[in-house]
Image: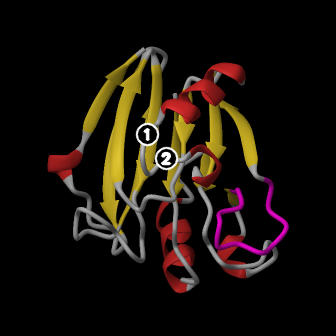
Amino acid sequence: MSKVLIVSDSHGLTKELIDIRERHSQEVDLMIHCGDSQLMPGQQAMLGYKTVAGNCDFADFPQELLEEVSGKRIYITHGHHYSVKSSLMRLQYRAAEVKADIVCFGHSHELGAEMIDGVLFVNPGSIRLPRVRPEKTYVILDIQSQLVKLSVFEVNGRKSSNLAREFHF
Protein backbone atom coordinates (compact mmCIF):
# COMPACT_ATOMS: atom_id res chain seq x y z
CA MET A 1 0.00 0.00 0.00
CA SER A 2 1.38 3.40 -1.03
CA LYS A 3 0.21 6.96 -1.31
CA VAL A 4 0.99 9.25 -4.24
CA LEU A 5 0.46 13.01 -4.24
CA ILE A 6 -0.25 14.59 -7.65
CA VAL A 7 -0.19 18.30 -8.43
CA SER A 8 -0.10 20.18 -11.73
CA ASP A 9 -0.24 23.56 -13.40
CA SER A 10 1.05 25.64 -10.50
CA HIS A 11 2.29 28.35 -12.93
CA GLY A 12 4.94 30.05 -10.81
CA LEU A 13 3.56 29.37 -7.34
CA THR A 14 6.25 28.49 -4.79
CA LYS A 15 4.84 28.88 -1.26
CA GLU A 16 1.88 26.67 -2.13
CA LEU A 17 4.10 23.83 -3.45
CA ILE A 18 6.25 24.03 -0.31
CA ASP A 19 3.14 24.02 1.91
CA ILE A 20 1.68 20.99 0.11
CA ARG A 21 4.99 19.11 0.39
CA GLU A 22 5.35 19.91 4.10
CA ARG A 23 1.71 19.08 4.81
CA HIS A 24 1.88 15.59 3.25
CA SER A 25 5.55 14.51 3.07
CA GLN A 26 5.26 12.14 6.05
CA GLU A 27 2.23 10.32 4.63
CA VAL A 28 3.05 9.94 0.92
CA ASP A 29 5.62 7.75 -0.82
CA LEU A 30 5.82 9.74 -4.07
CA MET A 31 5.08 13.35 -5.02
CA ILE A 32 4.39 14.13 -8.68
CA HIS A 33 4.20 17.46 -10.51
CA CYS A 34 2.59 17.07 -13.94
CA GLY A 35 4.19 20.18 -15.40
CA ASP A 36 3.71 23.89 -15.96
CA SER A 37 5.43 24.72 -12.70
CA GLN A 38 7.30 27.52 -14.51
CA LEU A 39 10.10 26.95 -11.98
CA MET A 40 13.63 25.56 -12.21
CA PRO A 41 14.49 22.00 -11.07
CA GLY A 42 16.75 23.09 -8.18
CA GLN A 43 14.34 25.60 -6.69
CA GLN A 44 13.23 24.92 -3.11
CA ALA A 45 9.57 24.61 -4.16
CA MET A 46 10.38 21.76 -6.57
CA LEU A 47 12.42 19.63 -4.16
CA GLY A 48 10.91 16.19 -3.68
CA TYR A 49 8.57 16.37 -6.67
CA LYS A 50 9.04 14.03 -9.65
CA THR A 51 8.37 16.61 -12.36
CA VAL A 52 7.75 16.62 -16.10
CA ALA A 53 7.90 19.54 -18.51
CA GLY A 54 4.75 21.36 -19.49
CA ASN A 55 4.18 23.65 -22.45
CA CYS A 56 4.93 26.71 -20.26
CA ASP A 57 8.14 25.24 -18.80
CA PHE A 58 11.54 26.19 -20.13
CA ALA A 59 13.62 24.27 -17.60
CA ASP A 60 15.23 20.94 -18.36
CA PHE A 61 12.51 18.64 -17.05
CA PRO A 62 11.84 15.32 -18.83
CA GLN A 63 8.83 15.11 -21.16
CA GLU A 64 7.63 11.95 -19.43
CA LEU A 65 8.43 9.71 -16.48
CA LEU A 66 7.59 6.16 -15.45
CA GLU A 67 7.48 5.29 -11.75
CA GLU A 68 6.50 2.07 -10.03
CA VAL A 69 4.62 2.12 -6.73
CA SER A 70 3.00 -0.88 -5.02
CA GLY A 71 3.31 -2.91 -8.21
CA LYS A 72 1.53 -0.27 -10.32
CA ARG A 73 3.27 1.45 -13.25
CA ILE A 74 2.59 5.18 -13.17
CA TYR A 75 3.08 7.15 -16.39
CA ILE A 76 3.55 10.91 -15.90
CA THR A 77 3.26 13.53 -18.63
CA HIS A 78 1.90 17.04 -18.96
CA GLY A 79 -0.52 16.12 -21.73
CA HIS A 80 0.07 18.86 -24.30
CA HIS A 81 1.77 16.39 -26.69
CA TYR A 82 -1.35 14.21 -26.55
CA SER A 83 -4.10 16.79 -27.18
CA VAL A 84 -5.72 16.02 -23.82
CA LYS A 85 -7.95 19.09 -24.03
CA SER A 86 -9.98 17.41 -26.78
CA SER A 87 -9.65 13.67 -26.10
CA LEU A 88 -7.72 11.14 -24.03
CA MET A 89 -7.37 8.78 -27.01
CA ARG A 90 -3.74 9.62 -27.89
CA LEU A 91 -2.77 9.48 -24.20
CA GLN A 92 -4.55 6.13 -23.94
CA TYR A 93 -2.41 4.77 -26.78
CA ARG A 94 0.78 6.00 -25.06
CA ALA A 95 -0.35 4.42 -21.78
CA ALA A 96 -0.74 1.08 -23.59
CA GLU A 97 2.73 1.43 -25.17
CA VAL A 98 4.41 1.92 -21.77
CA LYS A 99 2.12 -0.61 -20.04
CA ALA A 100 0.87 1.94 -17.51
CA ASP A 101 -1.66 1.12 -14.82
CA ILE A 102 -2.10 4.78 -13.83
CA VAL A 103 -1.61 7.90 -15.95
CA CYS A 104 -1.03 11.30 -14.32
CA PHE A 105 -1.36 14.39 -16.49
CA GLY A 106 -2.37 18.05 -16.42
CA HIS A 107 -2.54 20.77 -19.09
CA SER A 108 -6.32 21.22 -19.18
CA HIS A 109 -6.49 22.52 -15.57
CA GLU A 110 -9.61 20.33 -15.19
CA LEU A 111 -9.87 18.01 -12.19
CA GLY A 112 -10.87 14.54 -13.30
CA ALA A 113 -10.29 10.81 -12.96
CA GLU A 114 -11.61 7.90 -14.95
CA MET A 115 -10.86 4.26 -15.75
CA ILE A 116 -10.42 3.49 -19.44
CA ASP A 117 -9.73 -0.13 -20.39
CA GLY A 118 -8.33 -0.91 -16.95
CA VAL A 119 -6.04 2.14 -16.80
CA LEU A 120 -6.70 4.96 -14.32
CA PHE A 121 -6.29 8.46 -15.82
CA VAL A 122 -5.88 11.24 -13.25
CA ASN A 123 -5.76 15.00 -13.76
CA PRO A 124 -5.35 16.77 -10.40
CA GLY A 125 -6.63 20.09 -11.75
CA SER A 126 -4.63 23.24 -11.07
CA ILE A 127 -3.56 24.85 -7.80
CA ARG A 128 -3.44 28.24 -9.53
CA LEU A 129 -5.90 28.52 -12.42
CA PRO A 130 -8.60 25.83 -12.23
CA ARG A 131 -11.09 25.39 -15.04
CA VAL A 132 -14.67 24.05 -14.85
CA ARG A 133 -14.59 23.86 -11.02
CA PRO A 134 -13.68 26.87 -8.86
CA GLU A 135 -11.53 24.89 -6.39
CA LYS A 136 -7.74 24.97 -6.72
CA THR A 137 -6.99 21.27 -6.35
CA TYR A 138 -4.44 18.49 -6.02
CA VAL A 139 -4.95 14.77 -5.50
CA ILE A 140 -3.66 11.95 -3.30
CA LEU A 141 -4.00 8.36 -4.47
CA ASP A 142 -4.04 5.60 -1.86
CA ILE A 143 -2.88 2.63 -3.94
CA GLN A 144 -3.77 -0.81 -2.66
CA SER A 145 -3.42 -4.07 -4.60
CA GLN A 146 -6.68 -3.99 -6.56
CA LEU A 147 -8.09 -0.68 -5.32
CA VAL A 148 -7.14 2.98 -5.63
CA LYS A 149 -8.78 5.52 -3.35
CA LEU A 150 -8.62 9.04 -4.75
CA SER A 151 -8.83 12.02 -2.39
CA VAL A 152 -9.10 15.63 -3.60
CA PHE A 153 -7.62 18.49 -1.62
CA GLU A 154 -7.86 22.23 -2.06
CA VAL A 155 -4.61 24.18 -2.12
CA ASN A 156 -5.17 25.22 1.52
CA GLY A 157 -5.23 21.53 2.56
CA ARG A 158 -8.98 21.19 2.99
CA LYS A 159 -10.13 17.72 1.90
CA SER A 160 -13.13 17.70 -0.44
CA SER A 161 -14.82 14.53 0.79
CA ASN A 162 -17.66 14.80 -1.74
CA LEU A 163 -15.10 14.46 -4.59
CA ALA A 164 -13.48 11.25 -3.26
CA ARG A 165 -13.66 8.25 -5.57
CA GLU A 166 -12.62 4.59 -5.60
CA PHE A 167 -11.35 2.68 -8.61
CA HIS A 168 -10.92 -1.11 -8.91
CA PHE A 169 -8.29 -2.84 -11.03
Task: Name the residue beneath numbered marker 2.
Answer: 84
Report the number of discs: 2
Q: Is residue 44 left or right of residue 74?
A: right
Part of the protein shown in magenta: 51-62
Residue 27 visible in the picture: no
Q: Amino acid at mark 2?
A: Val
Instruction: Quote the CA–CA distance across marks 2 and 1.
Output: 5 Å
Q: Quadrant of the C terminus?
A: top left
Query: What's the residue at 44%, 41% (across, down)?
Result: 122
**Is-magenta flag for residue 91?**
no
Above/below status of 4 relative to 32: above
Give residue 143's position: percent from left, percent from top.
47, 30
Find out whether the residues at labels 2 and 1 contact each other: C-beta distance under 8 Å: yes
In the figure, 123 relative to 75: above or below? below
Q: Is residue 144 above or below residue 86?
A: above
Provide the major secondary structure of the magenta segment: loop
Q: Extreme left residue here? A: 162
Q: Residue at x 49, y 46 (%)?
A: 84
Q: Is residue 87 visible?
A: yes
Numbered label attached to residue 74: none
Residue 126, by quadrant, is bottom left
User: Can you tell which mark lies on residue 87?
Assistant: 1
Residue 128 is drawn in which quadrant?
Answer: bottom left
Q: Residue 23 in the image: state x and y as whole percent.
A: 47, 67
